[in-house]
Amino acid sequence: MTTQAHRVRRDPHIRWEDIVVHALLLAIGLVIALPIFIAIFTSFKLPSQIVTFPPEMFPRVWTYENYITAWNVNPFGRFLLNSTIQSGIITIGQVIFSIMAAYAFAILDFPGRNALFYLVIGSLMVPFELVFIPNYQLISALGWGDTYMGLTAPFLVSAFGVFLLRQFFLTVPKDFHDAARIDGCGNWRFLWTVLVPLSKGAIGAFAIFAFLSAWNQYLWPLIITSRIEMRTLQIGIRYFMSTLDRGADWGPVMAGAVIAILPALLVFLFAQKQLVRGIAMTGLKG
């Protein structure tokens, strides 16, 4: 018994290297999350406490008045609805089109497949600012300004999604496809009844990326919409700076910011295991 206990002490499960790494990551995470904590606590403060110096982290008196003001001073419900519709359409469009394109590049054999795939990947190196004006001119010419089509059409396809899902599809054994073809299963049926269920982890991970990216858009909705009824949540927060009687009342502004980040935060918290699993399962096979 003594020998066994001594062996356990000599071979501990926790190493100092792991403790240092976890402590460092925790410190970095706290620094990154500090602005979020400040916004949350500020949203519950009274106006007099927000401007105190030195600043105080926690509210002395907790109040929900800032959230009531943020919701009523502008059509905040409309802003939230617009962001939800925009993010939902973009996420669904990117997932569907990325699945079909990734299947073509991974499974089908057609002339110029590799060259076309490299062209798609090359588009990842083109910043959106470079195609901003052509996209704006096209959407305006189609009469899609101040519409959901204008908000979502330029983002319905994602080169990153095509790359991510293609890499995962390549890890699926080719025997599955051959067996399905022998049983009379065509490409369309094999994709949606066999390949997609096997790829739920990778598809779910990409859907999270697509939703978060769409939810946090600012520049494009700011330019393509002019009516307040079509503004998204991120643009709507800016209206607090000009519509509040006292100017920049940071309590309602922070309350609006908390409401804006809450959906994205909840999606990440509830789907982080799916996100990590999907990325880990996605291979880098060429």
Image (cartoon, helix red, strand yellow):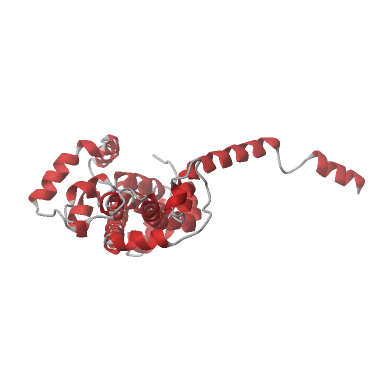
Side of 150 relative to 267 (left or right): left
Q: Residue at the right extreme?
A: 2
Is residue 270 at least partly visible in the picture? yes
Classify the position of the C terminus by image quarter. Answer: top left
Q: How many numbered dots are placed on residues in this image?
A: 0
- Residue 90 percent location from the top left of the image: 28, 55
Question: In terms of image quadrants, where is residue 12?
Answer: top right
- Residue 96 percent location from the top left of the image: 29, 57
- Residue 249 percent location from the top left of the image: 35, 50
Report the front residue among 197 and 81: 81
- Residue 81 percent location from the top left of the image: 29, 63
- Could you tell me which residue is drawn at 26 percent across and 41 percent down? 120
Report the front residue among 33 and 46: 46
Report the front residue among 64 and 160: 64
Side of 152 relative to 206 (left or right): left
- Could you tell me which residue is drawn at 33 percent across and 62 percent down? 71
Is residue 179 at least partly visible in the picture? no
Report the front residue among 166 and 201: 201
- Could you tell me which residue is drawn at 35 percent across and 54 percent down? 211
Q: Residue at the left extreme?
A: 141
Side of 274 relative to 256 (left or right): right
